[in-house]
Amino acid sequence: MIHRAVYPGSFDPVTYGHIDIIKRASQQFDEVIVGVLTNSKKTPLFSTEERVNILREVTKSIPNVKIKSFEGLSVNFVRECNAQVIIRGLRAITDFEYELSMAQTNRILAPDIDTMFLITSLEYAYLSSTTVKEVAAYDASIEQFVPPVVSEALRKKLESRH
Ligand code: PNS
């Protein structure tokens, strides 16, 4: 059996914190599928296609990572992928309640699928896509937070909105 995990999220945009989780998960599983949520309640800055393309670019050196987009419930996507595990990163106690309710809900919907949490590396514990977008909007440097391809894409996106 292929030991496969899905790492679902918005990735709007992907940060070094997400990449850290992807790398570490790829060392624990035969294959990791990063699932980019399309129909989120949040309105994303980047389109699904843009988020998928950026993720493909920044993970291209990790052979057992695949990037896909999905709509609807994460657990259904996990089943479609023939995976057994959902991966999520936990940064701080503030993430816990949301992650717990999501994991419990997913477990009720799909008792055969387990959620596993990786604790975000300390250097990225403060990092979120939202804060990256905010810092970028004020024209400050975001090179410590995201790979160059993301800062370039963010710069272009924000320019086009002015
Ligand atoms: O990166 P995010 O925004 O924290 O990721 C949230 C995500 C995509 C994992 C979550 O919103 C999700 O799984 N959405 C799909 C809908 C779903 O399965 N809901 C049931 C769990 S409450």
Image: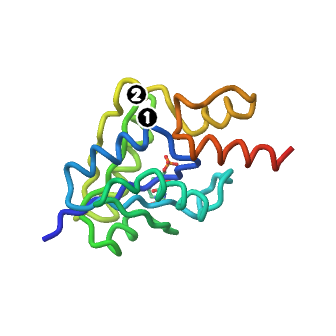
Disc 1 designates what residue?
95
Q: Position of residue 111 (x, y in %)?
A: 25, 62
The residue depicted at 27 percent of the width and 43 percent of the height is 24
Quadrant location of residue 68? bottom left
Q: Are marks 1 and 2 in contact (CB under 8 Å)?
A: yes
Q: Residue at x 26, y 62 (%)?
A: 31
Observer-nearest of 148 and 161: 148
The type of residue carrying mark 2 is: Ala
134 displayed left or right of 55:
right
| Crowdedness near tag 1: few (<14), some (14–19) or many (≥20) residues, C-alpha within 10 Å | few
Q: Nearer the viewer, residue 96 or 84?
A: 84
On the image, which quarter does residue 133 sit in? top right
Q: Is mark 2 within 8 Å of ligand 1?
A: no
Is disc 1 placed on a helix, strand or loop? Answer: helix
Circle 2: element type: loop
Residue farthest to the left, as pictured = 1
| Residue 126, horizontal then vertical, whole percent | 48, 26
**Which amino acid, by three-letter code, is at mark 1?**
Asp
Percent position of residue 98, x then y: 45, 41
**Image mark for residue 92:** 2
- Asked if the beta carbon under badge 1 is closer than 8 A to the nearest atom of ligand 1, the reply is no
Is residue 117 positioned above or below 141 on the image? Answer: below
